[in-house]
Amino acid sequence: MAENQNINSDNFQRSDDKISASCIRSGLAELEMQTTQTLKRLQNIQINGALDVNNENKLTQSCNSLPVTSCSSSDILKSLEDLISGSDSEEGSDIIYQLPELDEVSMLALVSQSFEAYISHLDRQTLLRIADLIAGDTSRWVGNLFKFPEPSASFHSDNGEAILRVLRLAIVSRCPGFLEGGIPALANPCLYICENLTHLRLQYACKQLGIAAEAIRVIPTTASGTMDLNLFQKEIRSDISANRNPLLVVADVGASLCGFADNLKRLKEICRANNIWLHASGHLLATLPIVQGTGTISSVVDSVVLNLGSWLGIPSVPIVLLHKQLQNAALTVSDSDAILSKRLKSLSLWASLQALGRENISEKVHVAFQTCSILYEITSKCEGIRILSRAPGAQTGSSLSDLISKPLDVDALFESAAPVVVFQFDGSSIQFDQDSTPPPSTDQNQDINQAIINKSIEKVENASYFDRLNAWLGQLLQRDCPNFDFEIIEHQIHGTCIRYCPLELSLGEQPAKADHLENFAACLESQVDILRATLKHKATFIKLVEKSDVLRLVNLPEWAGMGGVRFVPEGWETLLTDQAKAELNKLNMDLVDALKSTDNAFSLGEGPDSLSCVRFGMVTHETDVEELLDLVVTVGKSVQENSKVLDSMSEIVKKGIETAMQDLQRESEEKLWQEGILRHVPVVGRVVNWWSPPPKEGGIKGRSLNLTQGVVESTENIYKYHMQMTGAPNQLPGNKSPPTPMVQTPVITDSAGHSRSVSQSSATSVQEIQIPTQEN
């Protein structure tokens, strides 16, 4: 009977376990389904098209208070969709922000975050057990992948948290009583970092621990871009002699902009001799999963930071810090708490690593390094391109594939791979044509001019111009090569550069493929060819402008084209008053408008003196610079002549009206005295006109302004003979010549007082302007 009870009890226990497990499975499955549906729904916003007017109005309404009644989850999700779709859209535009597509691994990583929040509400003992298992598995897997066996691991949201943990480890390793006693237990700490690396994270860690920023020692680099170890050793000896405590060295293994790698073996010897914690960070650590031979990185460094989310393109996975184990109760006091230690944060990485597998991880990073190597070869063969990042395998001559099956040699491995390619156009290898520069001369002034021209096309003397050229090149590569995440950066020494790093992947991004590399090679060569042509023609451009009588070279350091010129008519430079500057600006603006009708490469610019000018864009090798400048001069003179004609016409019209008014006033006064005052007195004048009618042709005649001859004529012939007079007399029907106009007053006279007519070529289509008057 007891045995049956035990059996029944066991069956009940197993049944209870099944029910419990099924409840957990159903809960996670339901959460996964809802989360996946929500993510897919947000992802599908990219095909919605233009915003609905009603939704747009809802977005513009301000919500000053929480809604009184509860909102459904579907309404809340709809509001979120409206916020995403309307966040970057412009008024009247159909372009909507698109969330990146999610592959299976990325989807799992995001769903795992929901799982993390869900299972964190389990009872404490169960949560501790789950967190220990997940964090333990993740630590072992990552340690085996990156040649760091039996590590202690911590998981962080960003690099700032990771370097803070590293600094605590270094302090505890050197001063075990620091965490209990605080700053007094640590006297004058010293932290060392290469000048290639950013110091912000280390400064943040010092601020959190109450360490002065003066404790950070920045070590200069050698010509090869790595930390100068001789200066590093001198700095250590100086600090020790001043009773300071060297604590931490942050080594660069591909973390800098140009992907340099410090010599870890020599750093290890120096650090162990002085009891200093050696920490390494950078993209070159991603090469460790590729190596199949024996050897460990933990035998060289004390800790490493691994940014797996960036290297593998997986969203929302934590940064992993692997370090050697330290037995310190104060350091591990929070490790017993699953929440404080953030061990449960490793859940998304735990799931993603299993979804990828060791082979896929190794293949992904291997493809990224191969892409960098091929990209380096392409750019190094392009004439006029200078590469600032280091060449893979330049010192040892070994490639990454050669070291895969060999025992791990950290320095040789890191030297054989390049995580980034940084390049710029500087035109250093361009050979200028013989006809692009003037021939040598014994005249000293011409030699000086030639020296000025040569300096204008050198990067050292015109760095701002080359920065614009590289910015133009980078923007075109970003447009024409969308599979490469090219970044335009500002180098402290070399200025504007273009950087490519396949190990800094964002969500949904993948390393480039072979066909993408072929497209990049063709695109780079075609665009750099334009830059080479522009640089070659710039010398000819400067030479021809300097020789021109009406063109002036304008310095445009922010313009990436061939340059700028200003059309200045002869004699204008000596009378540049404010009114003359305004007229010169208008003249050049009209010139640009006229040039745009022939070539869109012309544009309106502004020089340092705030005066307008003509900007020349990029050119090709076939471009005839002399022909372009001749076109500018020809069109400029035409615009100038048209401007003079308009000024002359306005002067003629103005003076013609004044002359006509004076003639009409004089004729009116003469008529008044001839006819008598009584005819113009009200009531009396009617009686006089009835008694003695005035002559029919005695009225005041109007005036006509002849623009061709510049004279004011009477309108008698127009109204009486129904014709219009011109410069040469025309014959009337019946061989009758018209009478001579009654009034013909010249409008414009020369300096000698003689009348001057307007040339026939400058006359407008309207030959006469009539100024009639009412005849009595």
Image (cartoon, rainbow, N blue to C red):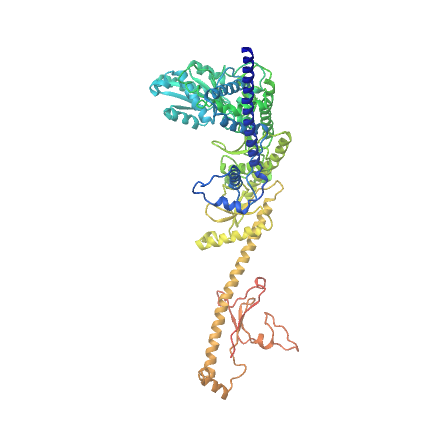
Q: Is 625 positioned to the left or the right of 492 in the image? A: right
**Front residue (pair 522, 156):** 156
Residue 581 drawn above or below residue 367: below
Q: Position of residue 743 (x, y in %)?
A: 53, 75
Residue occupying the far front of the picture: 1
x then y, percent, for residue 514: 64, 29
Residue 139: x and y in percent read 51, 19
Q: Which residue lies at the image location 63% right of the left edge and 78% below the top edge?
A: 736
Residue 538 lies in quadrant: top right
Residue 224 visible to an observer of this rendering: no
Q: Position of residue 251 (x, y in %)?
A: 47, 21
Residue 578 appears left or right of 417: left
Q: Residue furthest bottom?
A: 691
Q: Residue at x 61, y 34 (%)?
A: 525
Q: Is residue 482 visible?
A: yes
Given residues 84 and 321, the one toward you in this image is 84
Horizontally, residue 373 falls left or right of residue 152, namely right
Where the N terminus falls, by quadrant?
A: top right
Query: Relative to the observer, which residue lies in front, 583 or 22?
Result: 22
